[in-house]
Structures are given as C-alpha cells and as structure tokens.
C-alpha cells in the first residue's frame, strides 16, 4: 500500500514538472518562432522545433529523480537535483549528437536553439525543485 501512495505522489509531482517543461518549451518556441521569422525568414524553424523538443525531453528525463525523491519524502533533494542535471545533460547530448552528425538540420542553428531552450528551461526546473523541497520541509506556505 505504501508503494501505491508513493506512485500517486510521484505521478502528481512529476506531472507538475512536465507541465512546467511544456509551458516553458511552448513560450520559448513561440518567441523563437517570431525571432526566426524576423532573422532568417523562417529558414530555421525545423532547428527551432528540434532544439525545443530536445530540451523538453531532457527536462522530462531530468525531472524523474527529483520527483522520485520528493514523492518519497527523502532528504536527498540536493543529490536528486545533481542527478537530474546530469540526466538532462546526458539526454540532450544523446539526442542532439545524431542530428548534428547526421546532417539532419543546420548544425549551428540546431545547437543554438538547444542551448537557448536548455538554458532558459533549467532555471524553471531548478526553482520548481527547490520550491517543492521547501514545501516538503514546511518552510514555505502552499
């Protein structure tokens, strides 16, 4: 019965992280689309979409260890955040490498959009993890 409660807690925590990741990727995508239309006449839209998609997937993978630790009530949140950062970075590298090496998209614009979306999504994920950890400890009102 404890594992069922843990899974429900995990699902709720993970859903919050995923929804924030989707929202962040959407905002970055809309702003990036407008910028791409202005700067490149729409030539880099595929690189923009791939870059935001890679960062979104990486963010969702990185949320797993943090959501797991938060749902278990463990005090190891610092380790989970570090593990999440490593998981995010590793996932981003694994996803971007074949696209760059395979010549699927313009290398420079793909790497640029992965970097921009990754850097803009990371603070949102980190702040969410810290805020959730503080709530778990009872330091911050809900």
Image (cartoon, rainbow, N blue to C red):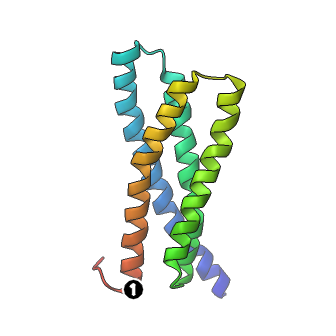
The image position of residue 83, as x and y in percent, is 58, 67
The residue that appears at 67% across and 22% down in the rendered structure is 103
Residue 22 in view in this figure: yes
Q: Residue furthest left?
A: 141
The residue that appears at 37% across and 40% down in the rendered structure is 27
Instruction: Identify the secondary structure beneath mark 1.
Output: helix
Pointer 1 residue = 137
- State whether residue 47 is above or below residue 80: above
Question: In front: 19, or 64?
Answer: 64
**Mark 1 crowd level (few <14, some 14–19, many ≥20, 10 Å Cα):** few
Q: Answer with left or right where residue 71 lies relative to residue 30.
A: right
- State whether residue 139 is above or below residue 116: below
How many numbered badges does the structure rendering display? 1
- State whether residue 2 is above or below residue 87: below
The image position of residue 65, as x and y in percent, is 59, 68
The residue that appears at 49% across and 75% down in the rendered structure is 78
Q: Answer with left or right where residue 7 lies relative to residue 112.
A: right
Q: Quadrant of residue 84?
A: bottom right
Question: In front: 40, or 135?
Answer: 40
The image position of residue 26, as x and y in percent, is 42, 40
Q: Answer with left or right where residue 57 lies relative to residue 119.
A: right
The residue that appears at 53% across and 25% down in the rendered structure is 108
The image position of residue 142, as x and y in percent, is 30, 76
Task: Locate the N terminus and report the quarter of the image it occupies.
Answer: bottom right
Residue 23 in view in this figure: no
């Amino acid at each position: 019965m404890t594992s069922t409660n843990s899974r429900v807690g995990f699902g709720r925590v993970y859903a919050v992280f995923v929804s924030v990741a989707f929202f962040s990727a959407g905002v970055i995508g809309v702003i990036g689309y407008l910028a791409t239309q202005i700067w490149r006449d729409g030539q880099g839209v595929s690189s923009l979409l791939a870059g935001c998609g890679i960062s979104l997937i990486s963010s969702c993978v990185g949320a797993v260890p943090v959501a797991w630790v938060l749902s278990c009530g463990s005090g190891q949140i610092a380790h989970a955040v570090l593990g999440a950062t490593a998981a995010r970075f590793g996932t981003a590298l694994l996803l971007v490498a074949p696209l760059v090496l395979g010549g699927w998209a313009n290398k420079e614009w793909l790497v640029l959009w992965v970097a921009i979306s990754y850097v803009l999504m990371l603070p949102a994920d980190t702040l969410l993890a810290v805020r959730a950890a503080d709530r778990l400890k009872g330091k911050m009102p809900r």
